[in-house]
Image (cartoon, rainbow, N blue to C red):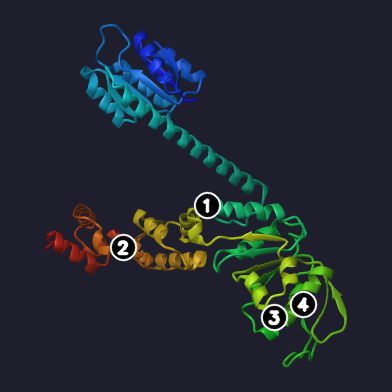
Amino acid sequence: MPTVLIIDDNAAVGVALDVLFSLHDIAALHAASPEEGLELLARQPVDLVIQDMNFTADTTSGEEGVALFREIRKRHPDLPVILLTAWTHLDAAVDLVKAGAADYLSKPWNDDRLLATVTNLVELGQANRALNQRLQRERRARRELEQNYDLRGLTWADPATERVLTLACQVARADVPVLITGPNGTGKERIAEIIQANSLVRNGPFVVLNCGALPSELIEAELFGADAGAYTGASKAREGKFEAADGGTLFLDEIGNLPLAGQMKLLRVLETGRFERLGSNRERRVAVRVISATNADLQAMIRAGTFREDLFYRLNVIELKLPPLASRPGDILPLAQGFLPPGKTLHPSAEAALLAHTWPGNVRELKNVMARASLLANGDVIKPAELGLPLPAGSSQEAEPDREAIVQALARAGGVIAQAAADLGLSRQALYRRMERLGIARAA
């Protein structure tokens, strides 16, 4: 049940409001003075305060109410306050609303309006408290992650990324294969590095093989090595990635590109730790933690007969699903700022443009955009035009900015069109068109 604190020296007001609220399942506390009200607030949580503006007999200035409000706001900055006022100090109440009071009501008040205001403010307060509690939990969980694990300097802020990181750190010390899925450019290799950094083999090698970057006939040789003469051009024996990763971690990116013959050998290594180099009959043994990643639908590949089902289940003991960047918008601005050189920052309009973009290329695309913008920027503040992003579908450059924004930008730029256009995120031609349409004269 929500609780309202009434601070009013008139006992009749307290009784009337107590009766009104009790009929609507709202508990009421009553304090007859500012001191009593502040004491109650210090020892008992309430959802809302209704306070009078005067407490001393024959006083109508409202100064006591102003002082009380300011003290409540100082001690409880998020607590909603409704002012009960007479017309003689209405201006003071209006000023307090501008300073953060939730509302004011004139005496005698309207019950329906008061109830509606109280109900709305209590619901809003409860929602805000729930949000603050969630944010506090997220900040606490983030601090614990940063303190307890080596995150390899990863930049993130979105809860979706945090969930992936938490699971990655939880399974890092377990000697089981991990499959990281998600679109290209989302940072799957960074997650693999974090697993390695927190694993029991963190002091061992971390070896990477992109199965999609090699011809299929060479992938097996890269994985398992080859003796001299094993294939055309193999003039001497070579070590494979499994041997190089012995005692550490092997990260197999784009695992869906591994041919079926290689899949069968990989399954054997995962099950026994044994393999032979191409062209060799000598069995070798290694201890390697395997982390794989793919942007492909391995289940569909299994149905199509291009990926072994038994290998899928062997690789997929733990699956980490890394969402696309557009699905974790909290990461966009921290990553963007992190990709900029020291000293460069983002204009608020550039931040809005980054958040509005759909990022089909994910983090890799964002990194390239920021690298380009930092090279093209005329100053230390990145503007939207320097990002080079397409406009969102259905938007139009002709809609913004308005006359006042253009006049202010021209004033800041001293009439220099190119500088004002960059400040507004427009091309010079687009700014000229707006100036002509709005009747804004060019500087002589």
Whether pointer 4 and pointer 3 mark residues with C-beta atoms closer than 8 Å, the reply is no
Secondary structure at numbered mark 3: loop
Q: Give the Cα separation between the discs numbered 4 and 2.
A: 52 Å
Q: Disc 2 marks which residue?
A: 395
At a point 55% along the width and 60% down the height, the residue shown is: 323
Give, as a three-letter code, the residue at label 4: Met
Give, as a three-letter code, the residue at label 2: Ser
Secondary structure at numbered mark 1: loop
Q: Disc 3 marks which residue?
A: 259
In the picture, residue 416 is in which quadrant?
Answer: bottom left
Q: Residues within 10 Å of mark 3 (few under 14, many from 20)?
A: some
Give, as a three-letter code, the residue at label 1: Asp
Whether pointer 1 and pointer 2 mark residues with C-beta atoms closer than 8 Å, the reply is no
Residue 91 shows in this picture: yes
Secondary structure at numbered mark 4: helix
Which mark is first along the chain, 2 or 4?
4
Q: Disc 4 marks which residue?
A: 264
Where in the figure is residue 52, as x and y percent of width and height?
A: 33, 17
Which mark is first along the chain, 3 or 4?
3
Q: Give the Cα separation between the discs numbered 1 and 2.
A: 27 Å
Q: Give the Cα separation between the discs numbered 4 and 3.
A: 9 Å
